[in-house]
Amino acid sequence: MTVLVETALGEANLFHRGKVRDTYDLGDRLLMVATDRISAFDVVLPNGIPDKGRVLTQLSAFWFDLTSDVVPSHFLHLIDGTEVEGVPFSIPPELIGRSMLIRKAKRLDVECVARGYLAGSGWVEYQDSGKVCGIPLPSGLRESDELPEPIFTPATKAESGHDINISFEEVVDLVGERTASVLRARTLAVYGFARDYARERGVIIADTKFEFGWLNDELIVIDEVLTPDSSRFWPADGYQPGQAQPSFDKQFVRDWLISIGWNREPPPPVLPDDVVEGTAAKYREAFHRITGQELLVP
Ligand SMILES: Nc1ncnc2c1ncn2[C@@H]1O[C@H](COP(=O)(O)OP(=O)(O)O)[C@@H](O)[C@H]1O
Ligand SMILES: [Mg+2]
């Protein structure tokens, strides 16, 4: 099983190399390539996870198609091996199924998070103050409980390190009232749609993060959407509020890293094969459950 942890498209200009994705500049478009890199506790691990990049890209493409009437996005085309217009070089075979052509937008530096369930930093904040991002919630909620209705819990997009939860008013200060309202409405609209869709297929999307950008005068969804990397996916069978839920994808990795007592500082340890394979199986399962489709693996 081959993995791709690095891309080098000599002919193209690198636009951004992130923890997981390498993005190339094509003028008014970008070629976004999801590698098989995986991070845990904010550190990129030395192993790649087979097919992870394909799952991220093809799941995002699936959702962009499905939600195109709910919200406009940057998505143009999945690189699936057929001829694409607008790429001025030939795309190497290992990038097929893991890359997409997108419209370049001017990113807003707000992480637009929707939460339907109480977990992660939301759960921490709630225990402290009874609120999440300034939104008061009913008392007596347990960890992983479903919220009465989904909430918009934005965060600042920190260049490095952890994002910081902010209130809606702080988003207004950053981008203005009108834009903040559109961000909130679109975030909740897409989340609500996807949550219902996934729930019927045995996956709880507990929360998810969107990024938005300006394309001319329009606010569009950019980046990846509704993937295991940008969301908390829980298997619906086995859902048990009152405790932390096993995450669909990274649980093996996190459990193993904790079991060996890694201090969460680089350099990270090399994952054993069974942890890699178990994690790969989870990513593939998330894709199959949600889309009902076969993953395109050239
Ligand atoms: N359509 C777009 N236009 C401009 N920038 C985008 C677009 N889609 C995604 N991006 C940016 O490209 C980068 C994707 O790389 P990623 O691997 O997610 O990096 P990171 O580790 O910084 O999150 C992010 O900085 C994201 O904001
Ligand atoms: Mg990112």
Image (cartoon, rainbow, N blue to C red):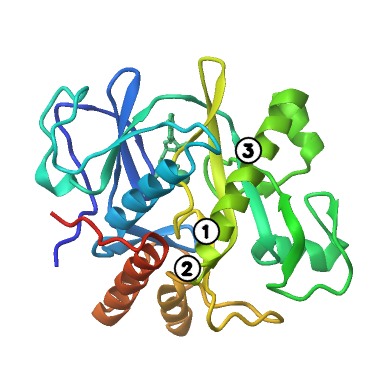
The kind of residue tagged 2 is Arg
- Spatial separation of the CA atoms under disc 2 and disc 3: 23 Å
Q: Say above or below: 236 vs 3.
A: below
> Residue 197, which numbered label?
1
User: What residue appears at the point 55 percent right and 43 percent down from the top-left corner?
Assistant: 210
Rendering coords of residue 93 (x, y %): 10, 45
Question: Is disc 1 in contact with disc 3, using a CB cutoff of under 8 Å?
Answer: no
In the displayed structure, does residue 215 sit left or right of residue 33? right
The kind of residue tagged 3 is Arg
Question: Is disc 1 in contact with disc 2, using a CB cutoff of under 8 Å?
Answer: yes
Rendering coords of residue 37 (x, y %): 31, 56
User: What residue appears at the point 58 percent right and 77 percent down from the top-left corner?
Assistant: 245
In the displayed structure, does residue 101 sit left or right of residue 174? left
Rendering coords of residue 114 (x, y %): 65, 51
For disc 3, the neighbor class at 10 Å (few under 14, some 14 to 19, many from 20) is: many
Which residue corresponds to mark 2? 201
Which residue occupies the foreground of this view, 268 or 187? Answer: 187
Which residue corresponds to mark 3? 186
Q: Do we see residue 105 in this rendering?
A: yes
In the displayed structure, does residue 35 sit left or right of residue 160? left
Q: Do we see residue 156 in this rendering?
A: no
* Residue depth check, mark 1 versus mark 3: number of the one nearer the observer: 1
- Spatial separation of the CA atoms under disc 1 and disc 2: 7 Å
For marks 1 and 3, the one nearer the N-term is 3
The kind of residue tagged 1 is Tyr
Q: Quadrant of residue 296?
A: bottom left
